[in-house]
Amino acid sequence: MQKGTNSKSRSKVLKNTITALIVVVSTYLAFSGVNFSLLFKYILQANYIYIILPIPIMLLSHWVRAIRWKTILKPIYESPSVFRLFSAVMVGYAVNNILPRGGEIVRPYIYAKQEKISFSSTFATIILERIIDVFTLLLLFGITFIFYSKKILSLLPPSIDLGKLLFLLILLMVIVIIAFYPPVFHFLLSKLVKPISNKFYLKIVDVFDKFRKGFAIVTKPSMYLKLLAESLIIWFFYSLPLFIMFFAFDLSSQGMNFMDSVLLVVASGISFSIAPTPGSIGVFHWIVKIILVQFYGVSGEQALAYATVNHGVNYLLQILVGGYFVFKDKSWDYIFNISFKDKDTNTQIEQK
């Protein structure tokens, strides 16, 4: 027991250390060589009408994400309220701004507790949501690549680790196979686990069956078009605030259009997936600076002013709205419980 606790502690320390290093290194790279007086000048002289204007659109993007979550949940639970889903989404974002990926545990946990449904099934919908986001990002990347192929290729390293890409593809295939054809998983368990411990086998099967319910939407091809439309709308509303803020920093006069904002969203989305930090701090600033400077010849100070304000508005919005719902719904009780009481056990977090 002591060894297991020490192992988890070391793993947590290592994870936090890596996250801190990513934040420090990416922030250093983003702000290295920057004239801070000029940076603050760009921020102070920005047209704040175009900074305030995107705020409702940012909220709308999160509302549409709640609507898509309702679509994913529908085969297992007919959610009575998009507003409650939206509140869980915003709490999740607020937690992500403090603990990278932490919100992806807190969000389904809070909602499962509030609605008294299975946490495993609800958590599975978040994993499926992330898979859908990855496919949507790849689709958008393909579209932007058509417009910016030469520029994008110039930023890629000369050698790409194909082994890692192959591993991710195989992992996705395994998840899809299990989701579509669960007997494969049951067969493996019956051969590998059941002979050793029937009790453990039954426990895994029970959790897996609840977890698999969260993937029920993939067995309904009639819903695919709806999911695709909702996903594209989400990423459209992610891109629109970036485009509007071009006008705040006079970037539109340099020929930047809506497709350029889509490129920024795709690049920042991919970079955050690879190197997650609290609220994408550092990583977002660095990738936006690279694209604006190398693609469009924008000065480092102007690029960072744009990235800093855009990130700051979104970050504060998520913290404030998510924090409001934490206090309104008393969600801190659930967050505290999942952190200190439930640990890794499934029996305490399952709701029939």
Image: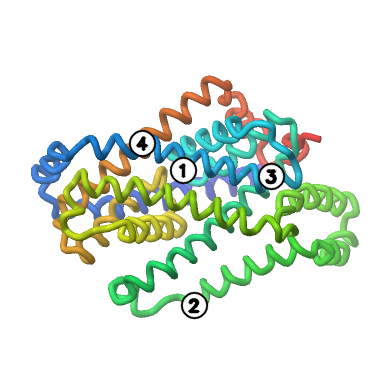
161 left or right of 248 in image: right
Q: Residue at x 32, y 71 (%)?
A: 148
Q: CA distance from mark 4 to mark 3?
A: 27 Å
Q: Residue at x 88, y 59 (%)?
A: 194
Q: Residue at x 83, y 48 (%)?
A: 206
Where is mark 4, residue-wise?
55
Image quadrant where one finds the C terminus:
top right
Q: Earlier in the sequence, mark 1 or mark 2?
A: 1
Q: Earlier in the sequence, mark 4 or mark 2?
A: 4
Q: CA distance from mark 1 to mark 4?
A: 10 Å
- Identify the amino acid type marked 1: Ser
Instruction: Answer few, some or many: residues within 10 Å of disc 4's Cα (few below 14, many 20 plus, some between 14 and 19).
Output: some
- Tell me whether the residue at label 1 lies in contact with that at label 4, contact meaning CB atoms closer than 8 angstroms: no
- Identify the amino acid type marked 3: Leu
Residue 161 in the image, given as x and y percentages of width and height: 45, 75
Where is mark 1, residue-wise?
61
Where is mark 2, residue-wise?
162
Secondary structure beneath label 3: helix
In-front residue for pair 6/288: 288
> Foreground mark, 4 or 2?
4
Q: Earlier in the sequence, mark 4 or mark 3?
A: 4
Where is mark 3, residue-wise?
73
